[in-house]
Amino acid sequence: MKFLNRLREPSTWAGFAGLAVAMGANPDKANLTAQAIAAVLAAVAVFLPEKGKAE
């Protein structure tokens, strides 16, 4: 589960974008893609309950 928690961090997506650019991807497209994925994960996180907290 630690990996899934890391996927929610913006720095992880910045790292993925940097890796993609290093491998030859267009920097603008790599950053845009990383931001879009991070935004989707942030929106999903709004609806996911925290562990141990049930209503």
Image (spheres, rainbow, N blue to C red):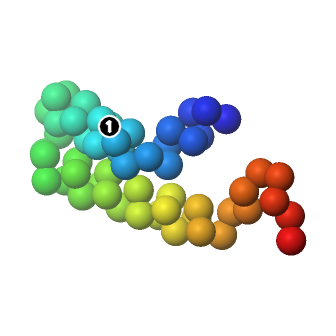
* Total residue callouts: 1
The residue identified by callout 1 is 16
Residue 11 placement (x, y as % from top left): 34, 42
Residue 6 placement (x, y as % from top left): 50, 38
* Foreground residue among 50 and 16: 50
Name the residue: 86% across, 71% down.
Answer: 55
> At numbered mark 1, what does the secondary structure look like: helix, strand or loop?
helix
Residue 52 seen from this side: yes
Decide: few, some or many residues near mark 1? Use Cα within 10 Å; few <14, some 14-19, many ≥20.
some
* Foreground residue among 46 and 13: 46
35 relative position to 55: left or right: left
Name the residue: 22% across, 36% down.
Answer: 18
37 relative position to 1: left or right: left
Q: Name the image quarter holding residue 26.
A: top left
Name the residue: 59% across, 68% down.
Answer: 46
Position of the N terminus, as image quadrant, is top right
Residue 20 seen from this side: no
Is the residue 49 above or below the residue 17 in the image? Answer: below
Q: Residue furthest right?
A: 55
Is the residue 7 above or below the residue 28 in the image? Answer: above
Is the residue 15 above or below the residue 53 in the image? Answer: above
* Foreground residue among 28 and 50: 50
Amino acid type assigned to the residue bearing label 1 in the image: Phe
32 relative position to 36: left or right: left
Q: Name the image quarter holding residue 33.
A: bottom left
Residue 37 placement (x, y as % from top left): 41, 56
Name the residue: 59% across, 62% down.
Answer: 45
26 relative position to 9: left or right: left
